[in-house]
Amino acid sequence: MRAAALNTGNMAYMRNKVDVAFNSNQYMRICLTIKTRKNLSMILNRDLTENETWEIIKPVCRELYELVNEGHIQFVSGIHNVNDGTYKINLKSNRLHFASRGLKDSIGDIEYNHGKIRIGLRSNGIPANVFVDLI
């Protein structure tokens, strides 16, 4: 088994039948190359912590920490899909205030269905879908 390693800053790459890359968020992406000329890319999801989630949402929700401290927004879960770079965030809330103010911020679409809201957005350049259960 032959492997070559290249270290550039905070990224380290190893090439062989399995490619492994670590970044500053400590998640791992694995791509397997199968000899029959088929490429199989495993879907890896990384769970987000509450603090990571708030850092993603903060650019489009300036009142975030006030809403959290007053109990208006509760973190449920968050997932980062490593393959496509998107984030899925689940919250519970009785009050929301999102606004796109920066050059890297945008609110793409909003969908409401029976007490649930889905907000597609880009916050500081990060694509995310925020699912909110209204309480």
Image (spheres, rainbow, N blue to C red):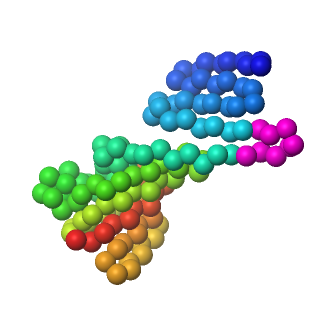
User: Is residue 118 in view?
Assistant: yes
In the picture, measured across the screen, residue 13 lies left or right of residue 78, that is right
Residue in the picture at 52% in, 31% down = 23
Of 117 and 38, nearer the camera is: 38
- Measuring from the top left, give residue 72's x and y in whole percent: 18, 62
Give the extent of the magenta segment. 33-40
- Measuring from the top left, give residue 53's x and y in whole percent: 35, 48
Kindly indicate the quadrant of the structure image that contains residue 22. top right
The verdict on residue 90 being magenta is no
> Does residue 114 lie above or below 86 as drawn?
below
- Measuring from the top left, give residue 41's x and y in whole percent: 68, 46
> Does residue 133 lie above or below 44 as drawn?
below
| Quadrant of the frame with the C terminus | bottom left
User: Is residue 63 in view?
Assistant: no
What predominant SS class does the magenta segment belong to? strand
In the picture, measured across the screen, residue 60 lies left or right of residue 104, that is left
Of 116 and 110, nearer the camera is: 116
> Does residue 111 lie above or below 2 as drawn?
below
- Measuring from the top left, give residue 117's x and y in whole percent: 36, 72
Q: Residue furthest right?
A: 36
In the picture, measured across the screen, residue 82 lies left or right of residue 107, that is right
Q: Residue furthest left?
A: 70
Residue in the picture at 51% in, 47% down = 45
In the picture, measured across the screen, residue 110 lies left or right of residue 71, that is right
Of 106 and 69, nearer the camera is: 69
Residue in the picture at 20% in, 50% down = 65
